[in-house]
Image: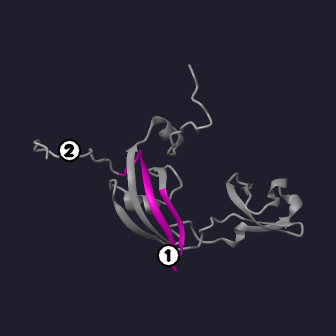
C-alpha cells in the first residue's frame, strides 16, 4: 500500500465535439426498418462543423459532447442520403462509356450540362449494355446509428485548409525511414 494519499489517473480528454475539432467515432449502422446491420466502424475520423459530407444529423447528435458519449440516432431517408431517384439509373450501350466501365463496381464521374459532377457506380454489364447508378447505396433507406465518441482533438491547419480530417502516415515495415 502506498503511503501517498493521492491516487493518480491519466488526465481525461475534456474536448467537446464542436466546429474545427477532429472527432473519432465508433458506430454501428442499421437499416431503420428491418434492423439489419449494414456497417460497423471503430475509427471513423471526420472534421466536425459541416466541412465534410458526413450526415448532418449525426453531427448534431454528438455536438457538444465529449469522448465516451454514446447515442442512438434515427434518420429518415430524407435526412440520411435522400430519396432513391430512378432517374439516376442509366442503361446505355457500352460504346457510350469509358473502357473501364466494363466491370461491375467501377466508379465513374458523370458531368451534367450545368457542370455538376455526379458519382455513378456500374451495377450491371451484359450484352454490350452497361447500367450505372448515381444514387448513394443507402438512398431511400431509413437508418439507425449507434455511435460512441472515441476521441476529440483540435484540427491541424492542414486539416482545416483541406476541409477534412487527415490520418497520420506511418512508414510501413518494408519502407525504412529516410536518413538525413
Which x, y percent locates residue 67? 34, 53
Label drawn at residue 171: none
**Is 83 left, or right, of 145 in this rendering?**
right
Q: Residue at x 57, y 22 (%)?
A: 179
For the C terminus, the image quarter is: top right
Which x, y percent locates residue 136? 62, 64
Q: Is residue 2 magenta?
A: no
- Tag 2 near tag 1, CB within 8 Å: no
**Is 88 left, or right, of 62 in this rendering?**
right
Q: Residue at x 32, y 54 (%)?
A: 66
| Location of residue 155 (image quadrant) | top left
Q: Secondary structure at mark 1?
A: loop
Q: As rendered, which of 56 and 150 lies closer to the eye?
A: 150
Residues drawn in magenta:
17-42
Q: Is residue 41 magenta?
A: yes
Given the current orientation, which residue lies at the most extreme front position?
Answer: 1
Q: Residue at x 59, y 68 (%)?
A: 138
Q: Which residue is mark 2?
A: 8
**Does residue 159 sit above or below 31 in this rendering?**
above
Given the current orientation, which residue lies at the most extreme bottom position?
Answer: 34
Q: Residue at x 56, y 66 (%)?
A: 81
Magenta stretch prevailing secondary structure:
strand
Q: Which residue is mark 1?
A: 32
| Location of residue 106 (image quadrant) | bottom right
**Is 54 left, or right, of 151 in this rendering?**
right
Q: Kindly report the distance in space between the C-alpha atoms of the residues bearing marks 2 and 1.
A: 44 Å
Q: As rendered, which of 111 and 146 lies closer to the eye?
A: 146
**Is 79 left, or right, of 97 in this rendering?**
left
**Does residue 82 sit above or below 66 in this rendering?**
below
Count of marks, rendered view: 2
Neighbour tally class for label 1: few under 14, some 14-19, many 20 plus, Cα within 10 Å: some
Amino acid at each position: 500500500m502506498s503511503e501517498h494519499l493521492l491516487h493518480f489517473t491519466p488526465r481525461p480528454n475534456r474536448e467537446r465535439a464542436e466546429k474545427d475539432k477532429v472527432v473519432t467515432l465508433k458506430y454501428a449502422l442499421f437499416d431503420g426498418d428491418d434492423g439489419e446491420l449494414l456497417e460497423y466502424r471503430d475509427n471513423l475520423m471526420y472534421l466536425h462543423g459541416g466541412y465534410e459530407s458526413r450526415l448532418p444529423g449525426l453531427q448534431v447528435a454528438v455536438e457538444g459532447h465529449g469522448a465516451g458519449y454514446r447515442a442512438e440516432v434515427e434518420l429518415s431517408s430524407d435526412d440520411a442520403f435522400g430519396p432513391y431517384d430512378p432517374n439516376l439509373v442509366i442503361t446505355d450501350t457500352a460504346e457510350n462509356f469509358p473502357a473501364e466501365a466494363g466491370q461491375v463496381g467501377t466508379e465513374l464521374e458523370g458531368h451534367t450540362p450545368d457542370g455538376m459532377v455526379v458519382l455513378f457506380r456500374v451495377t450491371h454489364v451484359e450484352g454490350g449494355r452497361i447500367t450505372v447508378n448515381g444514387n448513394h447505396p443507402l438512398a431511400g433507406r431509413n437508418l439507425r446509428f449507434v455511435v460512441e465518441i472515441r476521441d476529440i482533438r483540435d484540427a491541424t491547419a492542414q486539416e482545416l485548409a483541406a476541409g477534412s480530417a487527415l490520418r497520420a502516415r506511418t512508414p510501413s515495415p518494408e519502407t525504412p525511414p529516410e536518413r538525413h
